[in-house]
Image: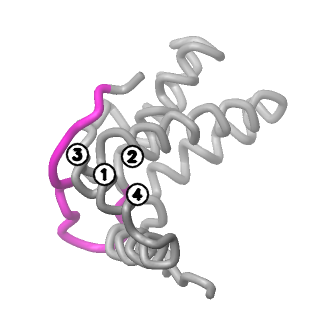
Amino acid sequence: MVAPTHGLLKMPKGKGFMSANMVLPLHDVLGRTLGAIPRDRIYRDAGLKYLPGPEEPVREQQVLDVFDAIRSEFPEQSRTVFETAGHDAGTIVAEYRIPASAKTALKRMPWPLATWMLVQSARMNAWTIGGSAQMKALT
């Protein structure tokens, strides 16, 4: 699994960036399932000549190019690859991006308040998973 990071993510200087967690777990999963040669070619073709650090933002277009290449070149395996990488990314966020004190506080709160707090946090950090997309929480 990708080496997680603690602390703040580097905020992008402009729009159109996403968290490296959109490509790092995928890089690991592709290597295990499809091999290093196709994985490295997909990343190189997307303009990712080196892997970003876990705290670095990645251009949204590069993330899209990686996802599109996987879907078009490996349609049979793409669902499993994305599900596995998504699970790995979720684990990284849950284990390393939410401080222990926040986890404890959330567990002690009534669930509607804890849910509201998590949604607010997700809104503030929506760029990490949605790039330039807009996030709207439905109630």
Q: Are marks 2 and 4 in contact (CB under 8 Å)?
A: no
Instruction: Say which residue label 1 marks.
Output: 98
Nearer the viewer's eye, disc 1 or disc 2? 1
Mark positioned earlier in the residue sequence (1 or 4):
1
Instruction: Identify which residue is drawn at 55% across, 82% down.
Output: 137
For the residues labelled 1 and 2, the Cα–Cα distance comes to 7 Å
- The local crowd at label 2, few if under 14, some if 14 to 19, many if 20 or more residues have their Cα within 10 Å, is some
Instruction: Identify which residue is drawn at 24% across, 50% down.
Output: 99
Nearer the viewer's eye, disc 2 or disc 4? 4
Instruction: Say which residue label 4 marks.
Output: 107
For the residues labelled 1 and 3, the Cα–Cα distance comes to 14 Å
Instruction: Say which residue label 3 marks.
Output: 55
4 in magenta: yes
Helix, strand or loop at disc 4?
helix
Rendered image: mark on residue 93: 2
Q: Are marks 1 and 2 in contact (CB under 8 Å)?
A: yes
- The local crowd at label 3, few if under 14, some if 14 to 19, many if 20 or more residues have their Cα within 10 Å, is some
Instruction: Identify which residue is drawn at 27% across, 39% down.
Output: 54
